[in-house]
Image: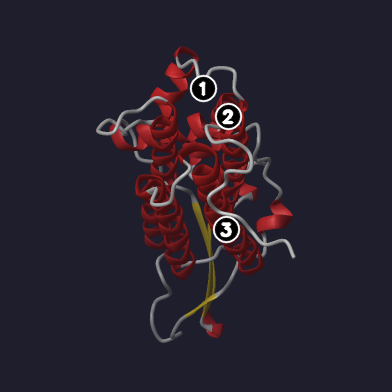
Amino acid sequence: MEYQKEKYSNPIEALKTIDKSYNQLQGKFILLGTEYANMITGTLGNEVFYLFRDNILRRLSAALYHYDILAKLNISGVPTLYDPRKSPPDGFHVGLHQSYVFDSIIFHLISGFDYFASFVKYFTYGHKDDRRELWSKLIKRMHTIDKLNQSALALELKAINKEFVQILVDYRAKLIHNESDFPKFLQKTKIFNGETFIYVTAPKSLHKKFKKLLPPIDSCSINEIALWLLDSSLDAFYRLLDATSIFFEENRVTLPGDEIIRFDKS
């Protein structure tokens, strides 16, 4: 999803929109569970399906929770009040602590996509005791899976991987194995007012990886980029669930009219 600064410059309103999207995604997952029972298994009690659903939502919820922590530490451009008889908060340490939390947001989001890869494996080519899969491995082996290859779901997986997820996976790998990524900060203090403004930019390496989608690094704060990553991830899951719904229809096992869960349209 291309970055639009006006969507994230007001963090409170942006978070309200993202929270609403998350709630809608929960509803979409519930509907998908109904479609799975009606089209694929023909039974209730699809506990493994629900376990994957709950694990994906848990990871996304954890990422949202960590954004709350990030925002409590500082929102760039919003004044932090302090006792003028004491020293103002240290912008370096604020930026450092925000970078710790930002890393956690990345980890939770990628974990959510890995869970989705396991989810796809479960209903396409996995076995009862072999459900684990990584996103990157799924992308590499999709063309070898007859049921999945050339499906609408496979095409969406490839598109989302190229646009967003693989870039994030590569960035996470660099954080874990090669190099930490510390953002720049700028601090201005009004001593007599007891106010300090701490502006923390997006982490440099992340910005470089997404440079085709993002404005210059000094014009997007770490808060705004975190919101953009959350928003983009939810958008990706929306697309994946839509494609999964099509996949269930294309690979239907039960006959139309034999749905086990029906809705009264009266």
The residue under label 2 is 153
From the top left corner, tell me how far across and down residue 247 is, in percent: 58, 31
Outermost residue, top side: 144
Vertical position of residue 7 compared to residue 254: above or below = below
Front one among 31 and 256: 256
Q: Secondary structure at mark 1?
A: loop
Vertical position of residue 113 compared to residue 183: above or below = above
Front one among 226 and 52: 52
Q: Which colour style is shown? A: secondary structure
Q: For label 1, count other residues whose C-alpha is less than 10 Å away and answer few (under 14), some (14-19) or many (20+).
A: many
Q: Earlier in the sequence, mark 2 or mark 1?
A: 1
The residue under label 1 is 148
Q: Secondary structure at mark 3?
A: helix
Q: Secondary structure at mark 2?
A: helix
Vertical position of residue 192 compared to residue 120: above or below = below
Q: In this image, 204 relative to 20: left or right?
A: left
3D distance between C-alphas at marks 1 and 3: 25 Å
Front one among 30 and 61: 30
Q: Residue at x 54, y 17 (%)?
A: 149
Q: Is residue 207 visible?
A: yes
Q: Is residue 201 visible?
A: no
The residue under label 3 is 27
Circles 2, 3 touching at the beta carbon (< 8 Å): no
3D distance between C-alphas at marks 2 and 1: 7 Å
